[in-house]
Image (cartoon, rainbow, N blue to C red):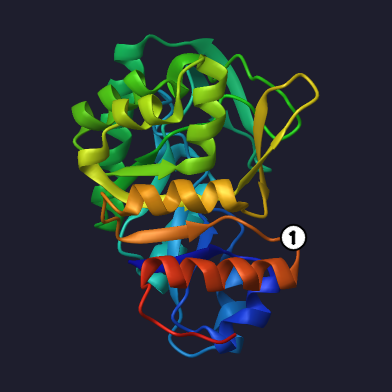
Amino acid sequence: MKIAVNFSPHLLQSLPRNPEIWVKISDWNSLWQVDAVHKVIDNPRFLIHLTLVPGSPTPVHQSGSIWTDLLELVRRVRPPYLSAHIGFRQRVDYAPDGRYRFGEALTDDAIIANTRRNLAILTEATGLETILENQTVVYGDGLEPPYVGHCAHPDFVSRMVNETETGFLLDLAHARVNAHFFGMSLEDYVRRCPMQRLREIHISGCRQLENGRLADTHAECGETDYQLLEELISHQSPEFLTLEYDQSQPALERQIERLFALSDPGALRKI
């Protein structure tokens, strides 16, 4: 398994000691991040995660500067694939500043059909496949966006991934949050996801809100997160483990060390 970490100034400090780390960037406004990474290590490798919403009736190549940036990023970094969230149950259009404009509600069949079409556009334009990630139904500040709804439910996630015949990206923090929200065990949530198509796992820490719910805040991973990840990878073999964290240099390095140990228990590393 390869280790990836989302881009941050802290990661730039760690990369010279850990040049084998893949850097996760987004499809929009990230060209400067590519330049910054090239300044600290030779021959860096990148993953690209989309802010584009495949499930919207808006064709992805009509997203303006987001699409322009994506094509340039793909040309420059040639990732092994693209990844995107499953998406929303409402139409999404793109403002010039990259923010979403939500429109009419969509049926499940329409979301899946739109995703199939948009993935085909992406593949034709980039030559890359796009894998799909389970969305979170509770955001970091406790917001429960009505435009997410059951798109975060494992049964819809499984239907989407299977019917579009894509790879699956399991965000473990999203799984924890969603299982808690939907009143099911994490084991049941994961079991109902399309794990036979697993390609990548995202890991980050959660926090409990005042109302008792969990939220993914991209906090430092705790022992619960590591135990869950260790259990998962004892049965699964994803290509990537991706850490989503950018808040503290010492904490980032602790987590990098731990993920390398989990991905290769026999390796002795010193950061």
Residue at point 51% right, 16% down?
182
Q: Is residue 95 visible?
A: yes
Instruction: Please state the total of marks drawn on the protein image.
Output: 1
User: Residue at horizontal 30%, vertical 63%?
Assistant: 80
Quadrant for the N terminus, please: bottom left
Q: Amino acid at mark 1?
A: Gln
Q: Quadrant of the C terminus?
A: bottom right
Answer above or below: position of 33 versus 228.
below
Query: Residue at position x 26%, y 50% from top?
Result: 236
From the top left corner, tell me how far across and down residue 232 is, in percent: 35, 47
Label 1 packing within 10 angstroms: few (<14), some (14-19), many (20+): some
Looking at the image, residue 247 lies above or below residue 52: below
At horizontal 64% and vertical 35% (from top left) the residue drawn is: 95
For this view, does 16 lie left or right of residue 60? Answer: right
Q: Secondary structure at mark 1?
A: loop
**Quarter location, residue 106:** top left
